[in-house]
Image (tube, grey):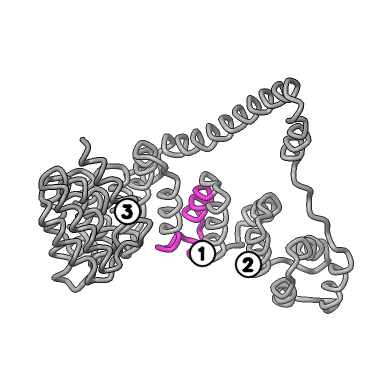
Amino acid sequence: MNNSLKPTDLQTQTQFDTGSNVTSSTVLHRYLHLSLYHSSLTPGSQSLRPRMNKRLKPPSKPVLDEARFRHAVSQLAPRFTAEELCSVITLEQDPLVCLELFNWASQQPRFSHDVSTYHITIKKLGVAKLYQEMDEVVSKVLDVPHIGSEALFNTIIYLFTEDRKLTKAVNIYKHMRKSRNMECKPSIRTYNLLFSALLSRGRNSYVNHMYMETTRCLFKQMVNDGVEPDIFSMNFMIKGYVLSLHVNDALRIFHQMGVVYKCLPNSYSFDHLIHGLCAQGRTQNAMVLFNDMKKRGFVPSSKSYNSLVNSLALGGEVDEAINLLWEMSKCQRSADFITYQTLLDEICRHQTVGDAKLLLEELLEKELVDNHTCGKLLHRIKENQRK
């Protein structure tokens, strides 16, 4: 069995990264062209050109504080160890000084960096969002076969995903799998970092569908390598399938949790599924899970309640939706404006405008809506009355 990620998966990621940059660059070029053309016609817009030029200028590169660097060097003994260097870098607040210390130490005779000095330097640069400088240090780590640890590589993966460099993060993961050092092998933490990054990429169901295939392959690879999934990885899979509109696959994973993976679902597992089922109009299936969730002692989230109230109302089950709204209030869960609006619309449709107004009055009396929201909802009722 081939346990490697599909090339098409990574190619898809690269295409999305590249495509977004090209699009933004093209739009900015056109906007700048139109703005400058417009400024030649409109005297009042002459100040736009310097503002646009200022935005196009690259940010000034931070400058090393030489005095601070010399002071940091003075804290080290003539023949300092990697542990001592790590302590000085840890205490140093300026990331550029940290980088300079790291580079300076690399040139000292009889000194070699270890995992700790690489780790703290990369972390300092990544937290400061000096990703280019961080990338250079990461390259040095990868060039030394015997240097590395799971914690170090997990930090690198996390920082690359923060910089939206998903392909680089996946390359670090591949490096971990190929390493002969067992301390560098991917753990459940590694996989969860990648699952989280893949899920955060999607902005619509199509994009989520493309990334979900990569997530599915990664999950399969994890299981084949003997890494047991935990509740976080299981919920990432459920959420990913829901976002990509593969709710049946999400249900399959859900029902395998306790049987196959020895990992019982939590409230988030139910919440993702209830929301996904309601989005597809499968209200009765969602209600079964909702009742099962409460039997297990979980309190549904506001997202689950809102999804169900909306779905019941849109399905014509207005009374059930109202009862669930009151239950929601007792559980101290908040309904959003869309839920109130949908419910009142359907009451006007299936019952009377008067019934909708009575419910709105009751919501106001119980302080579930404020005066401003009440006014907007009342205007909506009056619009339904005129139809």
- The reply, left or right, for residue 52 in relation to residue 221 is right
- The reply, left or right, for residue 267 in relation to residue 27 is left
Q: Residue at x 65, y 56 (%)?
A: 129
* Three-letter amino acid code at the position of disc 3: Phe
Q: Earlier in the sequence, mark 1 or mark 2?
A: 2
The residue tagged 3 is 337
Question: Mark 3 and 1 residues: CB-CB less than 8 Å, in contact?
Answer: no
Q: Dot 2 surroundings within 10 Å: few (below 14), some, or many (20 or more)?
A: some
Residue 173 falls within the magenta-colored stretch: yes
Q: Earlier in the sequence, mark 3 or mark 2?
A: 2
Residue 16 falls within the magenta-colored stretch: no
* Rendered image: mark on residue 321: none
Q: Is residue 108 visible?
A: yes
Identify whether 214 is placed above or below 264. above
Segment tinted magenta in the rendering:
169-190
Q: Residue at x 21, y 57 (%)?
A: 254
The kind of secondary structure element at disc 1 is helix
Q: Position of residue 164 (x, y in %)?
A: 54, 47
The kind of secondary structure element at disc 2 is helix
Quarter of the picture containing the C terminus is top left
Q: Position of residue 160 (x, y in %)?
A: 56, 52
The residue tagged 2 is 115
- Taking depth in this image into account, of 307 and 79 the one nearest to the observer is 307
Q: Residue at x 53, y 55 (%)?
A: 157
